[in-house]
Image: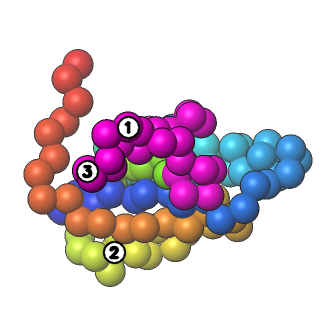
Amino acid sequence: MAVFAFLYHPTRTPSDAELAERAQRVRAWTLAQREAGRVLVVSVFEAGARLLPQDAPTERALEHESALAGCTFVQAEDMADALGLASAFPGRAFGTEVEVRPVGVFLTPAR
């Protein structure tokens, strides 16, 4: 099995009702994938991201639209399998794009 990172990019701000529905559906999907041994790590990012550009002396705030919402590390057979898993991610129905990247080195979290 290979490791892939799913990077979540928001494309719009969901309504309060959508946020509740999205949270419930994403949680159920994540728990099911973890139970199946596919989800390794889940991170949901808070607002307030800062970017420190390589060619500027100070950081700048990232707007919601350009910030990552979170990431999940998953196990999959290959890119096609990872894309199939990402296509089933329920957050997509609520304005989230999923970027799928192969991970060259994955160090499991310390316990």
Which circle's residue, 3 or 2, is located before the other in the chain?
3
Q: Residue at x 26, y 50 (%)?
A: 54
Front residue (pair 107, 68): 68
C-alpha distance separating marks 3 and 2: 35 Å
Q: Is residue 14 above or below residue 46?
A: below
Dot label at residue 54:
3
C-alpha distance separating marks 1 and 2: 41 Å
Q: Is residue 27 above or below residue 74?
A: above
Work out which residue is located at the far left of the displayed protein and give it: 105
Q: Is residue 52 magenta?
A: yes
Q: Secondary structure at mark 3?
A: loop
Front residue (pair 33, 90): 90
In the visual, does 18 lie left or right of 70? right
Magenta region? 41-67
Which circle's residue, 1 or 2, is located before the other in the chain?
1
* Percent x, y of residue 8: 50, 57
Work out which residue is located at the far bottom of the displayed protein and give it: 80
Q: Which residue is denoted by mark 1 in the rendering?
A: 58
- What amino acid type should be assigned to the residue bearing mark 3? Gln
Neighbour class for label 3 at 10 Å: few (<14), some, many (≥20)? few
- Residue 111, image quadrant: top left
Please identify, in this view, whether the residue under mark 1 or under mark 2 is nearer the observer.
Answer: 1
- Residue 5, image quadrant: bottom left
- What amino acid type should be assigned to the residue bearing mark 2? Asp
